[in-house]
Each structure stands twice: as C-alpha cells, then as structure tokens.
Image (cartoon, grey):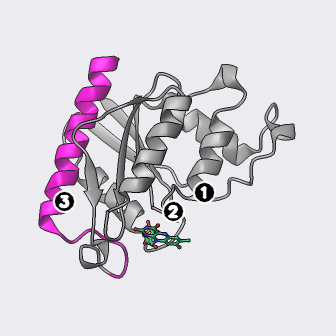
Amino acid sequence: MIRLLALPGSLRKASWNHGLLRAARDAAGDGITVTIHLLEGIPLFNQDLEGNPPEAVRAFKRAVADADGVLIATPEYNYAVSGVLKNALDWASRPTREQPFSGKPVGIISAGGRFGGLRAQLQLRQIGHGMGMLMMTRPELYVDQAASKFDAQGNLTDTATRDAVAAYVQALAAWTQRLA
Ligand SMILES: Cc1cc2nc3c(=O)[nH]c(=O)nc-3n(C[C@H](O)[C@H](O)[C@H](O)COP(=O)(O)O)c2cc1C
C-alpha cells in the first residue's frame, strides 16, 4: 500500500486545487490511498516558536512524516505559490533536524488561469529543492482555463483532466515506490 498525503495550497471552499486532490483521491485505485490534509489553522510562522510549535503545525509535520509520498496542489497567486502554502512549508522546514519533507517523494500539480499555475509550480520546485524534497519531474500537470473545468463547488468535471489526474497519481505512486 502506497500512502500519499495530499496538500491543497488554498483554503477556499470551492478551491480548484482542493478539487484536483479530491479527483486524485477518487482515482487512486487499488494499492494507493490519498489522504487530504488541510492547511487550515496553521498560524503565521514565528521562529521563536519553532522548537515548540502549535498543535496544527505538529499535526501537519506528523502527517507528512507518516506518508510515503506527498502530492501538493498549488494555486498561483501573483506568479507565485500561495502564502498559505509557503507558510506551512516554512514551519515544516524547522527545526532542520526534524524536517519531514527531506528525502520525501513529492508530486506537484496546479489549476489556474491562462498558464494553469505554471509559474507557481516552478517556484515550488525551487522551494522543494531547498527543502530536500525528491520531486517527480514527469509527467507534469497544469490545469489551465480552470474556470471551465470545475463546477461552482470546485469539483473537477472535465473528463480529460480527470484522466490526467488519474495517470498522475499512478506515476507518483510508482515514483514513491521506486524511492522506498
Ligand atoms: C491574490 C491572488 C492572486 C492571483 N494571481 C494569479 C496569477 O498570478 N496567475 C493566475 O493564473 N491566477 C491568479 N489568481 C487567480 C487564481 O488562479 C484563482 O483565484 C484560483 O481559483 C486560485 O486557486 P483555488 O481555486 O485553488 O483557490 C490570483 C488570485 C488571487 C486571489
């Protein structure tokens, strides 16, 4: 069994990126579980607290540590990852001796406007490099023109994109297994 932890970088109720991860969970199939962990409730990072972080941060770090691999769906905010996601990753990166992303297989997907979150993904790859994530490079999944591919509740309705998400989950599970 490959256990993937899925992190939406958006807190929005009808988030496209959260919807992508629900589609990933639905598509997981035999031998793979996808568990979505919301970043809700994680306070702003304060280095004074890194040795004794709040419970929401401990729970987040435990969930990452316990997973075999991680799937991050990031929104693009002003050509970058969301502050919500970056803040959570900053907490997870400290203290450096307890850094659950280091050596962890990670996949990155995104949904957005014209470029489907491409610029945010590139920035997240830089952050992941800094944190020692073992990022999968192929396949890539950028869901562009997302407004026409999700319903008003943020559920992915586009069949071709659902197939691409299913293929991505299979590839990430294989990547995770390869690095186990
Ligand atoms: C502060 C802010 C900045 C944004 N900047 C971009 C951007 O640079 N590129 C883009 O494609 N979409 C941008 N958007 C639109 C987001 O892609 C859109 O709000 C999307 O729904 C966010 O992801 P979510 O549905 O998972 O919450 C921006 C949205 C917000 C709120």
Name the residue rendered at 36%, 67% in the picture.
Answer: 112
Tag 1: amino acid: Val
Tag 2: amino acid: Ser
Disc 1: which residue:
84
Name the residue rendered at 60%, 49% in the picture.
Answer: 86
Residue 66's spot in the image, x, y percent?
A: 50, 29
Of the 4 image quadrants, the one containing the N terminus is top left
Spatial separation of the CA atoms under disc 3 and disc 2: 20 Å
Query: Do tag 1 and tag 2 residues touch (Cβ < 8 Å)?
Result: yes
Disc sitting over residue 162 in the figure: 3
N-terminal of the two: label 1 or label 2?
2
Q: Main secondary structure of the magenta part?
A: helix
Disc sitting over residue 161 in the figure: none
In the image, which residues are magenta?
Answer: 152-180
Ligand 1 contact, mark 2 (Cβ < 8 Å) = yes
Q: Nearer the viewer, residue 63 or 170?
A: 170
| Horizontal side, residue 177 vs residue 132: left or right | left
Q: Nearer the viewer, mark 3 or mark 1?
A: 1
Residue 154 forms part of the magenta stretch: yes
Disc 2: which residue:
10
Secondary structure of the residue carrying numbered label 3: helix
Name the residue rendered at 51%, 55% in the picture.
Answer: 81
Query: Do tag 3 and tag 2 residues touch (Cβ < 8 Å)?
Result: no
Name the residue rendered at 79%, 35% in the picture.
Answer: 50
Residue 88's spot in the image, x, y percent?
A: 62, 47
Q: Nearer the viewer, residue 130 or 147?
A: 130
